[in-house]
Amino acid sequence: MFIGEYQHTIDPKGRLILPAKFRYDLGEKFIVTKGLDNCLFVYPNEEWSKLEQKLSNLPLTSRDARAFVRFFFAGAAECDLDKQGRFLIPANLREHAGFDKEIVIIGVSSRLEIWSKEAWESYNESSELEYDEIFEKMAELGI
């Protein structure tokens, strides 16, 4: 399970050091793809396989399902760690997430999310007022 928030920098070549706490659970090879809210999603291969199975069962006749699957898979890249615990984030994914230099890596249960520091701070500021509403909705779902 991935939890926590870590601030890092991305080097000029697009390499990012993965926090040591996440390396074991993520594995040597993993998938990075476009995420929602202008971040990147990072999945261990096992979780990616589960997600792939679910998405492959979506109906081809649904325009929304086709669009989501295209968005998710077209932006995906297999990455691996070097000896220093770094990995290269492809340019198209760095562009999607608006990465400059400072980034934030957060653990979100079965995946990691990578955000530009600016986008993460903006997201948190805009979400603060909505947390009460979100908690109420989660209570209605039995959480």
Image: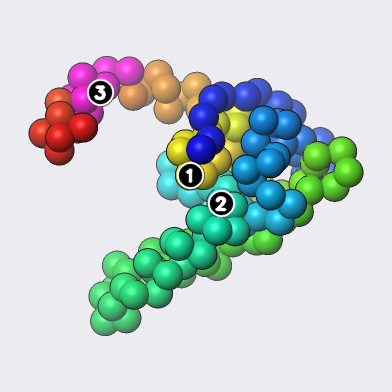
Name the residue carrying label 2.
43
Mark 2, residues whose alpha carbon is within 10 Å: few (<14), some, or many (≥20)? Answer: many
Q: Is residue 53 left or right of residue 44?
A: left
Check the image and tell me how it is coloured: rainbow
Q: Which mark is residue 101?
A: none
Residue at 21%, 25% (x, y): give it.
Answer: 135
Which amino acid, by three-letter code, is at mark 2?
Answer: Tyr
What distance separates the C-alpha of mark 1 from that of mark 3? 24 Å
Q: Where is residue 38 in the image (x, y as percent from the top left)?
A: 49, 43
Residue 80 within the magenta-colored segment of the rendering: no
Q: Is residue 75 left or right of residue 15?
A: left
Q: Which mark is residue 130?
A: 3
Q: Examine the image and state in which quarter residue 134 appears.
A: top left
Q: Is residue 139 left or right of residue 118?
A: left
- Contact check, label 2 and label 1, Cβ < 8 Å: yes
What distance separates the C-alpha of mark 2 from that of mark 3? 27 Å
Where, quadrant-wise, is the C terminus in this rendering?
top left
Mark 2 / mark 3, whichever is N-terminal: 2
Which amino acid, by three-letter code, is at mark 3?
Answer: Glu
- Contact check, label 2 and label 3, Cβ < 8 Å: no
Which amino acid, by three-letter code, is at mark 1?
Answer: Ser
Q: Say above or below: 19 vs 13.
A: above
Q: Which residues are the magenta region?
A: 128-135
Residue 132 within the magenta-colored segment of the rendering: yes
Mark 2 / mark 1, whichever is N-terminal: 2
User: Which mark's residue is nearer the viewer, 1 or 3?
Assistant: 1
Name the residue carrying label 1.
110
Q: Is residue 9 left or right of residue 103?
A: right
Q: Say above or below: 115 vs 27.
A: above
Residue at 32%, 69% (x, y): give it.
Answer: 65
